[in-house]
Image: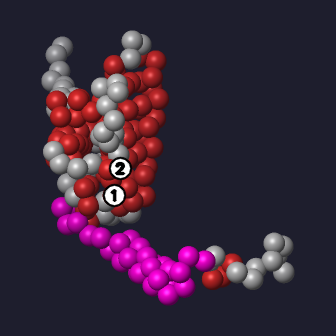
C-alpha cells in the first residue's frame, strides 16, 4: 500500500541563513522584528506551512487554518512558533519529541478555535475582524487617550485602592 503524503515545505535559504549559530539578526519566528527580504521569505513560507497543516492535519473544521490567518496576529505568531518548533523536532536524532509537537499542534488548534469563535466567517472565506477587533480597538483607544492625557501613572482605578478588600 502506498500513500501520497505532502512533503513539509522546504525552508528557504533566506530563512535558513538566519538560523545559523552566531547570526545576530532577528529570529525568523519573531514576526514583529522582521524586515525585508527576510519578512517576505518567512510570510511566504508560513503560508506554505499553513497549507501543509491543513492538508495533513485539518480533519475537522476547527482545525482549518483560514486563508486570512495573516490578519490574525495571534494565529500568525502561533503558526510561526509551531512551524519552527517542528523543524527542531524533526531534526533531532530521536523521534522522542514528536509527541510533544503533536500536543503543541492540538494546543494551536484550540487557540485557533478561541480566536476565530464558533461558526467563524473566516472559515468560509469571509474574513471578519468584528467583534474582537472592534472591542480591542475601542479599548486601546481609551487606554491611549487616558495615557496621553495623564502621562505615565498608575492605573486610575488602582490609585486609592487599599491592599485589602472592603
Residue at (38, 76) in percent of width and height = 137
Bounds of the magenta segment: 124-153
Q: Main secondary structure of the magenta part?
A: helix
| Whole-percent x, y for residue 26 in the image | 32, 42
Whether residues under marks 2 and 1 lie with C-beta atoms below 8 angstroms apart, the answer is yes
**Would you identify the image quadrant in which residue 130 lies?**
bottom left
| Whole-percent x, y for residue 110 in the image | 43, 49
| Whole-percent x, y for residue 43 in the image | 21, 47
Pointer 1 residue: 73
Q: Is residue 23 above or below residue 94?
A: below
Direction from residue 10 to residue 165 in the image, left or right: right
Q: Is residue 19 above or below residue 109?
A: above
Front residue of this view, candidates 74 and 154:
154
Residue at (20, 54) in percent of width and height = 67
Label 1: element kind:
helix
Find out whether residue 150 is within the magenta segment.
yes
Pointer 2 residue: 77
Residue at (25, 56) in percent of width and height = 70
Residue at (27, 33) in percent of width and height = 18
Amino acid at each position: 500500500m502506498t500513500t501520497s503524503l505532502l512533503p513539509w515545505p522546504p525552508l528557504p535559504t533566506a530563512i535558513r541563513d538566519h538560523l545559523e549559530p552566531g547570526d545576530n539578526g532577528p529570529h525568523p519566528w519573531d514576526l514583529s522584528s522582521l524586515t525585508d527580504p527576510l519578512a517576505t521569505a518567512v510570510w511566504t513560507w508560513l503560508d506554505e506551512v499553513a497549507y501543509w497543516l491543513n492538508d495533513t492535519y485539518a480533519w475537522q473544521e476547527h482545525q482549518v487554518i483560514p486563508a486570512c490567518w495573516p490578519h490574525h496576529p495571534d494565529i500568525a505568531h502561533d503558526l510561526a512558533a509551531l512551524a519552527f518548533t517542528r523543524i527542531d523536532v524533526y531534526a533531532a536524532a530521536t523521534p522522542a519529541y514528536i509527541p510533544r509537537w503533536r500536543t503543541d499542534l492540538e494546543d494551536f488548534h484550540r487557540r485557533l478555535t478561541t480566536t476565530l469563535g464558533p461558526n467563524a466567517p473566516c472559515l468560509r472565506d469571509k474574513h471578519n475582524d468584528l467583534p474582537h477587533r472592534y472591542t480591542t480597538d475601542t479599548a486601546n483607544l481609551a487606554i491611549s487617550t487616558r495615557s496621553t492625557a495623564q502621562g505615565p501613572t498608575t492605573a486610575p482605578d488602582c490609585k486609592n485602592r487599599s491592599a485589602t478588600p472592603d
